[in-house]
Image (tube, grey):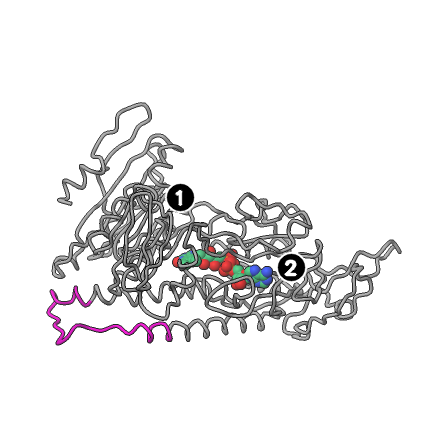
Amino acid sequence: MATSLTTPKLSSFSCSATFTLNSLFFPKSLHLSRPYFLSLPTTLLSLSHPRRTFAVRSQSQNGADAPPHYDFDLFTIGAGSGGVRASRFAASYGANVAICELPFSTISSDTTGGVGGTCVIRGCVPKKLLVYASKYSHEFEESNGFGWKYDSEPKHNWSTLIANKNAELQRLTGIYKNTLKNAGVKLIEGRGKIIDPHTVDVDGRLYSAKHILVSVGGRPFIPDIPGREHAIDSDAALDLPSKPEKIAIVGGGYIALEFAGIFNGLKSDVHVFIRQKKVLRGFDEEVRDFVGEQMSLRGIEFHTEESPQAIIKSADGSFSLKTNKGSLEGFSHIFFATGRRPNTKNLGLESVGVKVDKDGAIQVDEYSQTSVPSIWAVGDVTNRINLTPVALMEGMALAKTLFQDEPTKPDFRAVPSAVFSQPPIGQVGLTEEQAVEQYGDIDIFTANFRPMKATLSGLPDRAFMKLIVCAKTNEVLGLHMCGEDAAEIVQGFAVAIKAGLTKSAFDATVGVHPTAAEEFVTMRTPTRKIRKNQPSEGKSNSEVKAAAGV
Ligand SMILES: Cc1cc2nc3c(=O)[nH]c(=O)nc-3n(C[C@H](O)[C@H](O)[C@H](O)COP(=O)(O)OP(=O)(O)OC[C@H]3O[C@@H](n4cnc5c(N)ncnc54)[C@H](O)[C@@H]3O)c2cc1C
């Protein structure tokens, strides 16, 4: 589960490099011109991690000007997934590292955050806990066909869920703090701001560093429409004082769908408003169709091609959402899941010359270096692939590049990902549309079936699975699933896709029976063959659905 994605396991550290305690504690040539409050890096006293000499010594051999000495080899701003990973591995390679982070709160702001970052406090972890909570209602329903009867309708207590969730977040943020401490990273609470290419200001105290890492992540974005102040974002949606009775979710991305599933499972009346015809732009088209249909069957109402224009508060305290198509009333909550923006405002980036794009994301090269050579950036703030394991990979690669003499580029090929909607989605590799564009000739294998559990539960649940194969090389280019356990299944198959395995290798693999996952190794006949400059052979998406009785 998500905590294992993010809870680091410390590798043992040994380093034979010189330990220059004196030069690190008593810098002789500080390059700062402004008043300087000397901040002794107390974690250096942790001798379990002897320091290597990344901080340049104060006196050079030939009597030339001494290169500058810094408080730290690395100063990281933001202790989320990417920042923590980079910092603790840098420390394990012998670097002298400090990290700053805002004080803890479940709601992020300019002045609040918390060690662990979005994933732990306002993202993957609390979201998945709420997904678990919401799935029980379907399971109670499913269990009837298997002989279970309940004397009364099971009741859910929202306050218990939120209190238990918050206790777990406190436990996790504590684990993160300990991990940093055990790695010898100095944790400084406060807001970091870059003053010059080697100096960070944290609430009035200045720290110098050879390298600065910006890993400040992002925050939810709500468009500027009338009544915007009545809307909630994903931070608030994860920590509401009471369960929504009727909620409008604006947005068709993965966060919107996950929350639609959560509130639907917890018996709220859920309406999803999307600008386009379909949910999940960028996902495989068949998966987009399939998940929308399955979610509708569970009672979620989709309002397609509807853009919000205003939120109006009624005298009874409820809200209406005005869109280009009309107005819908009686909502207890209006939740905007309309994307996130990097936390780059008022961070001092412009003044030192760090380039950002039009959305405020920091521009970096393949090694995560910004336009200022001593300043680096990883994670959501760079808006590459905004997922926790990707931020971890980028942080890890950076630590190797800077402190292990091993220049390492994060590898963005075949990054698997999941949507914890209900049913969930797992995917890795190319979509059909991308594969056609990049390879031209491809074979598509699909399965659309009623899982065994649904036969007795009587529910209309189905599963969809898809393999995309290069006709020329037989390599499996993409693998997609929407159905129970999709995320877990796809994580396993992602190794095969990353390794570039062929369809023949899939065919030669024996299935585990009876599972849904075995479909991926038993699909023998292509659903359709797509050839450049030739009409496709086989069945279209709608023909497959008709044949399956959907
Ligand atoms: C609702 C939701 C669900 C998600 N679900 C998933 C999922 O299931 N799987 C997945 O892989 N990803 C998921 N994500 C995305 C994932 O959370 C992010 O990709 C990941 O947290 C990015 O890590 P990061 O280190 O870049 O930034 P963050 O984790 O956001 O960390 C940045 C940190 O910097 C701090 N900070 C900001 N400014 C300053 C400053 N000036 N000084 C000091 N500190 C500062 C912030 O307080 C924060 O703690 C989800 C995100 C959301 C919002």
Q: Residues within 10 Å of mark 1 (few under 14, many from 20)?
A: some
Q: Is residue 183 above or below residue 375?
A: below
Whichever of labels 1 and 2 marks the residue nearer the N terminus, that label is: 2
User: Can you identify the residue that label 1 sits on?
Assistant: 500
- Horizontal side of residue 511 vs 39, given as left or right: left
Name, please, the residue furthest toward the right: 63
Residue toward you, 442 or 253 = 253
Element type at mark 2: strand
Residue 457 percent across, percent down from the top left: 14, 61
Element type at mark 1: loop
Residue at image x 12%, y 76%? 151
Give the spatial CA distance, label 1 vs label 2. 43 Å
- Horizontal side of residue 148 vs 12, given as left or right: left
The range drawn in magenta is 140-164
Residue toward you, 524 or 315 = 315
Q: Is residue 163 above or below residue 259?
A: below
Quadrant holding the N terminus:
bottom left
Q: Is residue 455 above or below residue 27?
A: above
The verdict on residue 461 being magenta is: no
Residue at image x 22%, y 51%? 296
Label annotation for residue 193: 2
**Disc 2: residue Cβ within 8 A of ligand 1's nearest atom:** yes
Name, please, the residue furthest toward the top: 533
The answer to whether mark 1 and mark 2 are in CB contact below 8 A is: no
- Horizontal side of residue 425 vs 539, given as left or right: right
Residue 56 percent across, percent down from the top left: 76, 59
Residue toward you, 361 or 19 = 361
Residue 539 percent across, percent down from the top left: 20, 34
- Horizontal side of residue 241 vs 296, given as left or right: right
